[in-house]
Amino acid sequence: MLILGGTSEAAALDQHLAEQAPEIRAIISLAGHTVDPRPSNLPVRVGGFGGIEGLRQYLREEGVTAVVDATHPFAAIMPFNAEHACKAENVPLLAIRREPWQPQPGDRWEEVPDLEEAARALGPKPRHVFLTIGRLELPVFADAPHHHYLVRAIEPIGNRLPVPHVKVIQQRGPFHVDDEEALLRSEGIEVVVSKNSGGDGTAAKLVAARRLGLPVIMVERPPKPDVETVAHVDQVLPWLVAQGLFVTERGV
Ligand SMILES: NC(=O)c1ccc[n+]([C@@H]2O[C@H](COP(=O)([O-])OP(=O)(O)OC[C@H]3O[C@@H](n4cnc5c(N)ncnc54)[C@H](OP(=O)(O)O)[C@@H]3O)[C@@H](O)[C@H]2O)c1
């Protein structure tokens, strides 16, 4: 089984398989953006496959019989490559997609289709912005250099955000509401920018913003292919059973 990873779901599936089905031969694939990825039980391969054709070749050469797409909700290319390659090679594909966050009473969200719109939505007046979008797409905000940015990212951001006022916090979630509220207060944050990634690990900033009555510019997800999808890793083994690829001792 090939697991397309880079997410907390892939890490959870790694743990789930180690506990429930250690006999399954699986490998986790990472794009290679994170220099220091989480440790895993399963073997890991790193780097792109070389588009759809490269992935097809990988599936054939490695004798892959099932693919689980556990990429991030904002991965816009890999899910389509997986769909096309699996269809062409006749390999079953399952996607794990967490639910998006939904606005709650008291939230002041402005939903925008992409990061360019998010940068524009900050407006002409300088504001103190908490920017939690990862580091790779930070250059988009160089077009709005008049704001004060507090950036949180897992890895150093290098010179991706060449603006006069930027402060970086290097941290990996999960984060907690009280800490997030204290951070927003102490940094004088006026607006939060977030991708609608969903999940529990990074939702605390939204609760903290609600508590403080702060606006959130929420970037909507990119489109995904129409493939068989589940929301939780514990649905993967039943799917493998349904595909006839796995039989447990209990026969289910
Ligand atoms: N975008 C985000 O906000 C975000 C946040 C957290 C984690 N991640 C994770 O970071 C990785 C890259 O994200 P992205 O937004 O750059 O994805 P993407 O736009 O969908 O993918 C770009 C290219 O990166 C390679 N790639 C992506 N995921 C891969 C994987 N799991 N294994 C091997 N190669 C992979 C593929 O190269 P080839 O065409 O050469 O195969 C793909 O064409 C993904 O694994 C994703 O789960 C992304």
Image (cartoon, rainbow, N blue to C red):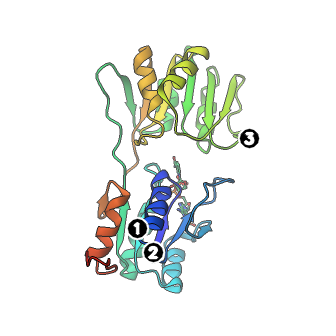
Q: Residues within 10 Å of mark 1 (few under 14, many from 20)?
A: few
Q: Quadrant of residue 153?
A: top right
Q: Earlier in the sequence, mark 2 or mark 1?
A: 2
- Measuring from the top left, give residue 226's x and y in whole percent: 30, 61
Q: Nearer the viewer, residue 155 or 141?
A: 155
Q: Quadrant of residue 239?
A: bottom left
- Measuring from the top left, give residue 128's x and y in whole percent: 58, 18
Between marks 2 and 1 in the image, the one whose residue lies nearer the viewer: 1
Q: Which mark is residue 158?
A: 3
Q: State the count of labels.
A: 3
Q: Are marks 2 and 1 in contact (CB under 8 Å)?
A: no
Q: Residue at x 52, y 16 (%)?
A: 190
Q: Is residue 247 left or right of residue 121?
A: left
Q: Quadrant of residue 39?
A: bottom right
> Element under label 2?
loop
Which quadrant does ligand 1 occupy?
A: bottom right
Q: Which mark is residue 20?
A: 1
- Measuring from the top left, give residue 247's x and y in whole percent: 31, 79
Amino acid type at mark 2: Met
Q: Residue at x 46, y 80 (%)?
A: 64
Q: Earlier in the sequence, mark 3 or mark 1?
A: 1
Amino acid type at mark 3: Gly
Instruction: Name the residue beneath numbered marker 2.
Output: 1
